[in-house]
Each structure stands twice: as C-alpha cells, then as structure tokens.
Amino acid sequence: MARRSGGLTIVPVTLYFKDGRAKVEIALARGKKTWDKRYALGEREASREVERAVSRRLKGRLD
C-alpha cells in the first residue's frame, strides 16, 4: 500500500556552495493546524500592542 504525502511541504534548511555548485539541504514539514495559527496570531497581536504602548509612553502620551 502506497502512502500519500499530502499536507507536507519541502523546506530549505541550509544553502551552501561547494565545488562551484549550489547545494541545498531540505526537510519535510507539516503545516500548522488551525488552532495553532490562531494562537500565533494572538501572540503577534499582543506583542504589537505592547510595542505601541511602550512607544506612546516614551513619546510622553498616556493614551
């Protein structure tokens, strides 16, 4: 029975040159799940809010 490789992505890990040729080391990776994407998006938004607050504070505004 053949195994399907759906949902996998080839990811370049390193790129280097040897003897006049470019060599790429690759890996197989599985994509993020929907809940994981939501969690990462929430973390990113929270860190942006912190940066905005710090920036406002440094500029002397207390919004």
Image: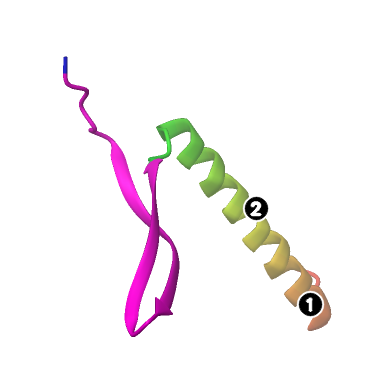
Which dot marks residue 41? Answer: none
Whichever of callouts 2 and 1 sits on the residue coming sooner in the sequence is 2
Q: Amino acid at mark 2?
A: Ala
* Residue 33 in the figure: left or right of residue 55: left
Label 2 residue SS = helix
* Magenta run includes residue 5: yes
Stretch in magenta: 2-29
Front position in the image: 20 or 12:
20
Residue at 81 percent of width and 74 percent of height:
57
The C terminus - image quarter: bottom right
Q: Position of residue 17 (x, y in %)?
A: 41, 79
Separation of residues labelled 2 and 1 (CA atoms): 20 Å
**Where on the picture, by quarter, is residue 24?**
bottom left
Front position in the image: 19 or 54:
19
Q: Position of residue 37 (x, y in %)?
A: 46, 41
Which dot marks residue 61? Answer: 1
* Residue 28 in the figure: left or right of residue 38: left
Label 1 residue SS = loop
Residue at 20 percent of width and 27 percent of height:
4
Q: Amino acid at mark 1?
A: Arg
Which dot marks residue 46? Answer: 2
**Where on the picture, by quarter, is residue 50?**
bottom right
* Magenta run includes residue 8: yes
Which residue is the extreme one toward the left?
1
- Characterize the magenta stretch by its predominant secondary structure: strand
Q: Position of residue 2 (x, y in %)?
A: 17, 21
Front position in the image: 47 or 12:
12
